[in-house]
Image: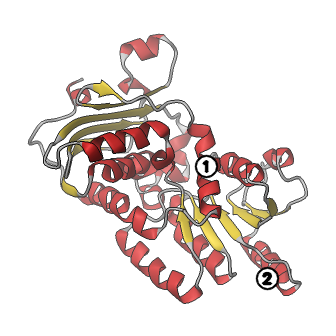
Amino acid sequence: MKNFALIGAAGYIAPRHLKAIKDTNNTLIAALDKFDSVGIMDSYFPNADFFVEFERFDRHIEKLKRNGTQLDYVSICTPNYLHDSHIRMALRRGADAICEKPLVLNPWNIEALKDIEKESGQHINTILQLRLHPSIIALKQKIDASSSNQKHDVDLTYITSRGKWYDISWKGDESKSGGIATNIGVHFYDMLSWVFGDIQENVVHLRTKDKASGYLEFEKARVLWFLSIDENSLPDDVKQKGQRTFRSITVNKQEIEFSAGFTDLHTVSYQEILKGNGFGLTDSENSIKIVHDIRNAALLNTGEKHPFLKK
């Protein structure tokens, strides 16, 4: 049984990490969040110590270490811009880190963490759950078996409506979240680069606070992508059903069905990490570079555009 700490216990994604720790027969010994709405912990680890101040949490972890309690992993579910700092804290305390995506906001942050990882002897893992989804694994196997010079046509559309709170929260601050492409798109870009190879071209057609769109070319794919948190972007038939989310990935006009099974993939991720098969810094490099370039690229009005831009 391994000992875990969790930073960001009140966040949206934290319950999946709590469940994964419990499902893998491990224990949570301490948790931190500046917000105290963490009653969800009662369903998983009611005896875990909880802190709302980082300094007291850090002191508690040090005390446990001095008293002979080994902290094995720190799970990090904090706002994107804090990931780097909290990863460093975990490694300094002699623990491995398990960090939500995006691992960091900029490519050079990864290079710095490589040095810290080497110095500490600890490991940094990140959650790239789409690589573990059966439908995506099957797609990769199919693409790997196809002609090496074949370019597949891919359409990625992801609309997940968000209310007015989004702009007020850290997610609406690009300096903290990295913007919409980073915050809701990074795992899709990771999946695309994992399946279709190295990035060759990155063109951005639209980038606002609530939507973004562009063209990506990989070794084996031409991708038109569209992301939005604006409910007005939803197709009419989706709106009529009262749904607030629309997700679609087509390859050569064939839909890839991967809606089911998302909630269990964190547990699968933890199982692989505990076996030493987690995704690390090198695995994150391509997607972090892609979102960094999307964030900083000049907008272009050339080339083929995603169909939703015509609305």
Quarter of the picture holding the C terminus: top left
**Residue on which disc 2 sits:** 62
Please state which of residues 254 and 302 is positioned toward the viewer in this rendering.
254
**Residue on which disc 1 sits:** 268
- Secondary structure under the numbered disc 1 in the rendered image: helix
Please state which of residues 75 and 245 is positioned toward the viewer in this rendering.
75
The local crowd at label 1, few if under 14, some if 14 to 19, many if 20 or more residues have their Cα within 10 Å, is some
The kind of residue on which mark 1 rests is Val
The kind of residue on which mark 2 rests is Glu
Q: Position of residue 286 (x, y in %)?
A: 33, 61
Q: Position of residue 180 (x, y in %)?
A: 40, 47
Q: CA distance from mark 2 to mark 1?
A: 30 Å
What residue lies at 64% left-to-right and 55% top-to-bottom?
Answer: 271
What residue lies at 34% left-to-right and 56% top-to-bottom?
Answer: 291
> 167 left or right of 250?
right
The local crowd at label 2, few if under 14, some if 14 to 19, many if 20 or more residues have their Cα within 10 Å, is some
Judge whether 9 appears above or below 165 on screen: below
Please state which of residues 23 and 188 is positioned toward the viewer in this rendering.
23
Q: Position of residue 83 (x, y in %)?
A: 55, 66
Judge whether 67 appears above or below 188 on screen: below
Q: Is residue 205 visible?
A: no
Kindly indicate whether the residue at mark 1 contacts the one at mark 2 (C-beta within 8 angstroms): no
